[in-house]
Structures are given as C-alpha cells and as structure tokens.
Image (cartoon, rainbow, N blue to C red):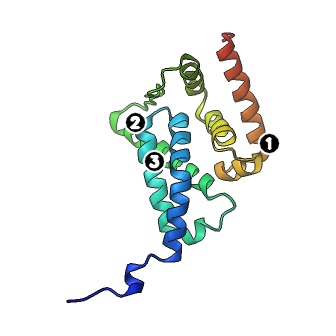
Amino acid sequence: MNIPTATEVTPSADRLAFDEFYIAHVHRIYRALAVTLGNDDLARESVDEAMTRAYAHWRRVRGLDYPAGWVFRVGLNWATSWRRKVGREQGVLTEERQPRTAATDPAALAAREALARLPLAQRAVIVCRVLLDLSTVETADALGLSEGTVKSRLSRGLTALRRALEGEE
C-alpha cells in the first residue's frame, strides 16, 4: 500500500494562494458577469470557465496588477464566443438580455433592466467601474481598451442609464 507523503497531501503555496483568490473574488465576478451578460446561468458557466483558466495559468495571473479583472475579461470573452457559436448553430445570433433575478425591489429591477438595454461594451465598463470597483486604468487593462475609451463609454452609459431611470427615453 502506498501512503502519501506530507508533500503529496499538503497543497502547494500556489494552490493556497489561488484558493484564497477564488474565495475572495468568485462571487463578485459572478455578479458582475450576470449583470453584464443579463443571464445568470451563462454568467455562472463563464465564471467557472474563467476561474479554471486562471488556475491553469495561476503563476502568470497572480502577477497581474488586478487578477480579478483578468478573470472578468476571460469570462466575458468566453460568454461572447459561446453566444456567437450558438447563434451560428441556430442560424440566428440571439442575445438574452432579460436577466433572471430573484430581486423584487422595483428600483433594483428597473436599474438592472435599464443596464441590460445598454450595449455590451458600455455595460462591461460600467460593471468594471461600479461593481468591481476598478479604476479607469484597471478597467482599461482588464477590457483591453484605452483609458479614453473607458471614460467615454462610462460617460455615455451612465447618461443613458440616468435618462432611462428618469423616464426620459
């Protein structure tokens, strides 16, 4: 009978660091993806895929300035690719924009619906800046955009949200 040694049973420092990262960020990234994608199930799948990829490349990912931003972007890219593939297979590109949520607060539902009507590019920037609390620089880095583009999309998106919530559409 082979009895595992202490080093075989004890998780590595990399594994422990990833576990801490996962616990600290998975729910926040999931919520951010759910709001951005407008689909809770797709967000759950995309955060799982992104976290799996983060674990596979943890030595590189942990060295990034904001690893959670990287995970968010990987999840968003994966979901976007998945939607394209499904659209091609069905012959039509469909985008589910009605979020499935347990929220019953009318103001929260109105805000989420207004956000869901924004273009994906604006939603992603708003979610990074507001829900993930990333700076302009971190958002630009996470989404692969220039800082000016982040500022522009944020401004336009917030203006559209404000108008929608004030009933000025």
Q: Residues within 10 Å of mark 2 (few under 14, many from 20)?
A: some
Real-space Cα separation, disc 2 to disc 3, in angstroms: 17 Å
The C terminus: image quadrant: top right
Query: Along the horizontal axis of the image, is 54 left or right of 64?
Result: left
Which disc, if any, is residue 87? 2
- Amino acid residing under circle 1: Gly
User: Dot 1 corresponds to which residue?
Assistant: 148
Task: Decide which of 75, 65 is in the foreground and name it.
Answer: 65
Q: Is tag 2's residue or tag 3's residue first in the polypeptide sequence?
A: 3
Task: Decide which of 76, 5 is in the foreground and name it.
Answer: 5
Q: Residue furthest right?
A: 148
User: Dot 3 corresponds to which residue?
Assistant: 46
Asked which secondary structure carries label 2, the reply is helix
- Amino acid residing under circle 2: Gly
Badge 1 vs badge 3, beta-carbon distance below 8 Å: no
- Mark 1 or 2, which is nearer the eye? 1
Q: Measured from the top left, where is residue 101 in percent x and y?
A: 45, 28
Q: Is tag 1's residue or tag 3's residue first in the polypeptide sequence?
A: 3
- Mark 1 or 3, which is nearer the eye? 3
Real-space Cα separation, disc 1 to disc 3, in angstroms: 27 Å
